[in-house]
Image (tube, helix red, strand yellow):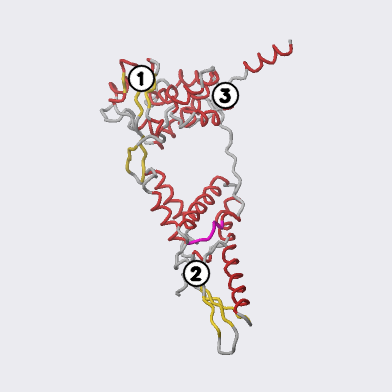
Amino acid sequence: MKRAAGEGSIVMRRDGRWQASIRIGGVRKTVYGRTRKEAAEKLEAIKIEAHMHGVIANPKGKTVADMFRAHIEANIPKWKPRTLHDWQVTVERYFAGLRDLPLAKLEPSDIQKSFSEFVLAGKHKTALRIYRTISAACKTAVKYGWLSHNPCDKVEPPRYKPERREVWNTAQLRIFLDGARGHRMFPLWLTAICTGARIGELLALEWSDIAADLCAIRINKSAQRIGGKWVVGEPKTASGNRIVPVPNAVIEAIRFTKQNFPPSSRVFPYSPGHIGRELRKECQRLGLPPITMHGLRHLHGSLLLSEGLPITEVSERLGHASPAITMQVYAHALRQDRAVEVMEKVLE
């Protein structure tokens, strides 16, 4: 009966000894025993060692590049264009030295080396992205039977703790609203502040999405610039499809844009880079701490929660997948005064 690939073979030699052989990572390993049982035990020891190193007996000549390629191809149907682009860029930029390495020879030390220099340079976020990228690809390799288990499990993930976002207070917001009113991008910034929409959602807005008579904006798509081209797709989450009521001031600002700037199918025909640069310059001119477009989204959520709006309502406006996500991101903004009132009554 023919043995399955990766099981190895055991035969009796002419000198009476038993010989056990198995191919691991393209290299044949051979052991001997005075009895068949002894040879079989030594063969099993080789298999166990291979398993502990995250390598199976017959990875079919696959390389680390093959592993990344397989992982990307397996996820294309569910990834958004931006995710696919970011994955391809990450693999090309950070794993060039590992691409041709036989998968059978991929060691935890190789994974450690792939991000160590970024940890030493203080680039902990990049280091964590590198670790998560190769770990996810290794999981696919395990699923396909190319690895017995994920070698990343033996590597301590780099630590990265995002800095807490500092948001403007109401006085700073008022300075911005009063001082930036004459800027061409003010309607965009005002819309971001009053809707909490993501930058991609704002850049995808078309004139048909503005319900001026209802003072509401329909958000049902997201635009991203990938490889020099605009790509319009679905919002980040299913909850991203929403109708967001806005103050009349937002509608008036958008109407001003339509009346005073060159015609465009998009309400805000700018690039993310241009928006960010102009926003930084305006903050500097007004003497305000710098803020990003995502910071304006964060400001919207923080202001609503600090004023006691129900978290479910805020979550719906932001297009979060669930209120639990909103709670996690904006816990610092939740009002604590009711808790204080309860404790004061207890102590009376």
Q: Which residue is denoted by mark 2 in the rendering?
A: 6
User: Is residue 330 at all visible to an observer of this figure?
Assistant: yes
Q: Range of the magenta residues?
A: 146-151
Q: Which residue appears farthest toward the right when viewing the image?
A: 347
**Quadrant in the rendering for residue 188:** top left
Determine which of the numbered discs, if any, sits on residue 333 in the image. Answer: 3
Q: Residues within 10 Å of mark 2 (few under 14, many from 20)?
A: some
Front tag of 2 and 3:
2
Measured in 3D between alpha carbons, the distance from the residue under mark 2 to the one under mark 1, in whole angstroms, is: 63 Å
**Quadrant in the rendering for residue 60:** bottom left
Q: Where residue 121 appears, x then y in whole percent? A: 59, 50
Principal secondary structure, stretch drawn in magenta: loop
Q: Are marks 1 and 3 in contact (CB under 8 Å)?
A: no
**Quadrant in the rendering for residue 32:** bottom right
Q: Residues within 10 Å of mark 3 (few under 14, many from 20)?
A: some
Measured in 3D between alpha carbons, the distance from the residue under mark 2 to the one under mark 3, in whole angstroms, is: 57 Å
Q: Secondary structure at mark 1?
A: strand
For marks 1 and 3, the one nearer the N-term is 1
Q: Nearer the viewer, residue 159 or 21?
A: 21
Q: Where residue 265 appears, x then y in whole percent? A: 27, 30
* Magenta stretch: includes residue 77: no
Determine which of the numbered discs, if any, sits on residue 143 in the image. Answer: none
* Magenta stretch: includes residue 148: yes
Q: Which residue appears farthest toward the bottom when viewing the image?
A: 15
The three-letter code of the residue at mark 1 reads Ala
Q: Nearer the viewer, residue 101 or 265?
A: 101
The three-letter code of the residue at mark 2 reads Gly
User: Is residue 280 at all visible to an observer of this figure?
Assistant: no
